[in-house]
Image (spheres, rainbow, N blue to C red):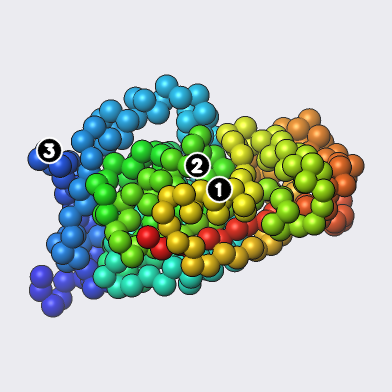
């Protein structure tokens, strides 16, 4: 490359290039990337035969109703997640990136990347990041944001969180933020994340959590009922919602996957009802039902959500867990 050739902020050519991701069985497939050659990292990403989503897995995913629903919902509203305050600028985004302490030589995987905010934040701090998601429209948004920001060391790939098409010990870092409550099998997602991590690799998780005795006082049965109410509330807004786990459930899953927990933090995420429901185009009847829950719901639910009237709208709090673990 000549000295006069245009370079991006990572010292790579501004032009898009291709990287090869090879199947163990020897067949080469290619993934669109915004980075220079992976040779610069001295690493190869090995894919497990039969898992590449555009070959076998995609057809399986489309047979699963809940997976199709996730794709439909997030495909329809993909563009809104590029500027969503909670996703693009939430405190947990910056805290996650800080706590995983990315290193310049690392290769990372961001699972259920959405509009790519975590991957985009990590990219300037490491060698390469793969931004994966189940929804092609989301990946298109992430790719577009990377181009706008001149980020060249990020590739995108369509895949399921519970069936990662990579060989064991591929990545130095695996992250996932505000997404597992849409997964069918959260335990399998955590196990897969641990499997593809190298020894000493870091797992970084952020997700909304349901109430339990580890984060608030109350009778066990009342807290369980409040958790059910909260997940009903979330599912009314977004039918692709499956379930927000409790902090206790998350910590148990991470431990069972053989990951040692390094840091656990709880963060408040202030929300405004109107814009939050607008993002998913919630119909008026459902909005009224949800608003009634905030204003007249059970004491446990209201204590967890902390609703406050605000000029005709309602402010409330979602609770996020940040978990950093090491393999």
Q: Tell me which numbered mark, 2 or 1, is placed earlier along the sequence.
A: 1
Q: Is residue 88 visible?
A: no
Q: CA distance from mark 2 to mark 1?
A: 25 Å
Q: CA distance from mark 3 to mark 2?
A: 29 Å
Given the current orientation, which residue lies at the most extreme bottom position? 3
Q: Picture coordinates of residue 96 (x, y %)?
A: 50, 65
In what element is the residue under mark 1?
Answer: helix
Q: Nearer the viewer, mark 2 or mark 1?
A: 2
Q: Picture coordinates of residue 234 (x, y %)?
A: 68, 40
Q: Residue at 32% x, 69% y: name it.
A: 126
In what element is the residue under mark 2?
Answer: helix
Q: Quadrant of the N terminus?
A: bottom left
Nearer the observer, 164 or 62: 164
Q: Is residue 246 visible?
A: yes
Classify mark 3: residues with Cα within 10 Å, few (<14), some (14-19) or many (20+): few
- Give the labeled residue for mark 2: 186
Nearer the observer, 105 or 299: 299
Q: Residue at 28% x, 28% y: name it.
A: 56
Nearer the observer, 143 or 218: 218
In the rendered image, which quarter is residue 265 located in? bottom right
- The answer to the question of whether label 2 and label 1 lie on touching residues, with beta carbons closer than 8 A, is no
Q: In this rendering, would 149 be left or right of 69?
A: left
| Residue 300 vertical position relative to residue 70 in the rendered view, above or below | below
- Give the labeled residue for mark 3: 25
Classify mark 2: residues with Cα within 10 Å, few (<14), some (14-19) or many (20+): some
- Give the labeled residue for mark 1: 80
Q: Picture coordinates of residue 210 (x, y %)?
A: 68, 48
| Residue 99 vertical position relative to residue 276 in the rendered view, above or below | below
Given the current orientation, which residue lies at the most extreme right position? 296
């Amino acid at each position: 490359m000549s000295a006069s050739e245009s370079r991006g902020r990572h010292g790579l050519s501004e032009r898009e290039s291709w990287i090869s991701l090879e199947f163990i069985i020897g067949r080469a497939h290619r993934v669109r990337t915004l980075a220079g050659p992976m040779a610069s990292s001295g690493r190869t990403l090995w894919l497990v035969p039969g898992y590449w989503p555009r070959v076998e897995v995609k057809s399986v995913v489309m047979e699963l109703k809940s997976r199709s629903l996730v794709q439909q919902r997030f495909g329809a509203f993909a563009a809104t997640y590029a500027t969503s305050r909670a996703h693009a600028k939430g405190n947990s985004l910056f805290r996650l990136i800080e706590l995983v302490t990315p290193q310049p030589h690392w290769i990372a995987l961001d699972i259920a990347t959405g509009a790519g905010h975590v991957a985009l934040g990590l990219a300037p701090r490491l060698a390469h990041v793969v931004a994966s998601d189940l929804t092609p429209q989301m990946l298109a948004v992430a790719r577009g944001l990377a181009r706008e920001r001149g980020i060249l060391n990020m590739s995108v790939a369509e895949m399921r969180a519970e069936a990662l098409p990579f060989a064991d010990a591929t990545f130095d870092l695996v992250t996932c933020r505000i997404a597992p409550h849409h997964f069918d099998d959260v335990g399998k997602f955590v196990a897969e994340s641990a499997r593809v991590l190298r020894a000493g690799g870091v797992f970084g998780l952020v997700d909304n959590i349901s109430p339990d005795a580890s984060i608030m006082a109350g009778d066990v049965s009342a807290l369980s009922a409040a958790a059910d109410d909260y997940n009903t509330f979330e599912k009314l807004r977004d039918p692709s919602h499956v379930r927000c786990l409790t902090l206790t459930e998350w910590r148990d899953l991470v431990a069972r996957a053989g990951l040692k927990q390094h840091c656990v933090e709880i963060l408040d995420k202030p929300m405004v009802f109107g814009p939050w429901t607008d993002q998913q185009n919630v119909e008026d009847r459902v909005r009224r039902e949800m608003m009634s829950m905030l204003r007249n719901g059970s004491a446990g639910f209201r204590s967890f959500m902390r609703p406050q009237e605000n000029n005709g709208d309602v402010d409330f709090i979602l609770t996020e867990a940040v978990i950093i673990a090491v393999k």
